[in-house]
Image (cartoon, rainbow, N blue to C red):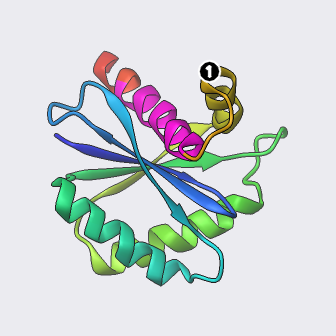
């Protein structure tokens, strides 16, 4: 099964795809958020899912230091709602914390940082579900 990982941010959304067997995640692309509605973003990501033959979407579940949804999670939930209206591809969330900082520590700041953070989220999800 092929997956799409999503690192939803206030400025950019990182995307990562898995191998067709769902074993490994790789950075895919970055979607700009500025001035765009959740519906427009959902359509763009649905098109990417169709082109990449994605069968499931995993969105990073963003929490604050107290373990509660942070400001970004409200926007991510709007995206999930809009995506679910236009696509039959199942969407799941998976806890993520500081993945952009992890990606920056591994590769430095660059234009694919958010996609790399999405790959970290997706790989964590894939690894956790291999064990269960």
117 inside magenta stretch? yes
- In the picture, measured across the screen, residue 66 lies left or right of residue 20, that is right
- Up-down relation of residue 113 to residue 39 (above or below): above
Residue sitting nearer the eye, 44 or 98: 44
| Picture mark count | 1
Indicate the quadrant where residue 99 lies. Answer: top right
- Up-down relation of residue 96 to residue 129 (above or below): below
Give the x, y percent position of residue 124: 46, 27
Indicate the quadrant where residue 65 lies. Answer: top right
Residue at image location 67% in from the left, 29% down from the top = 108
Residue sitting nearer the eye, 24 or 78: 24
46 inside magenta stretch? no
Magenta range is: 112-126
- In the picture, measured across the screen, residue 102 lies left or right of residue 17, that is right
Residue at image location 76% in from the left, 55% down from the top = 70
Give the x, y percent position of residue 9: 64, 57
Could you classify mark 1 by the number of other residues whose Cα lies within 10 Å: few (under 14), some (14-19), or many (20 or more)?
few
Give the x, y percent position of residue 58: 41, 48
Farthest front residue?
110
Q: Which residue is mark 1?
A: 106
- Up-down relation of residue 125 to residue 91 (above or below): above
Farthest right residue?
66
Give the x, y percent position of residue 80: 46, 67
């Amino acid at each position: 099964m092929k997956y799409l990982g999503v690192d939803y941010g206030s400025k950019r959304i990182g995307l990562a795809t898995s191998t067709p067997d769902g074993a490994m995640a790789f950075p895919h692309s970055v979607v700009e958020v500025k001035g765009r509605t959740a519906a427009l973003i959902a359509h763009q990501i649905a098109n990417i899912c169709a082109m990449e033959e994605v069968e499931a979407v995993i969105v990073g579940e963003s929490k604050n230091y107290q373990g509660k949804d942070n400001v970004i999670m409200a926007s991510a939930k709007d995206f999930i709602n809009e995506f679910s209206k236009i696509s039959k591809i199942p969407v799941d969330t998976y806890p993520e914390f500081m993945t952009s900082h992890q990606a920056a520590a591994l590769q430095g700041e660059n234009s694919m940082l958010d996609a790399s953070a999405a790959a970290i989220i997706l790989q964590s999800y894939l690894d956790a579900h291999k064990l269960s």
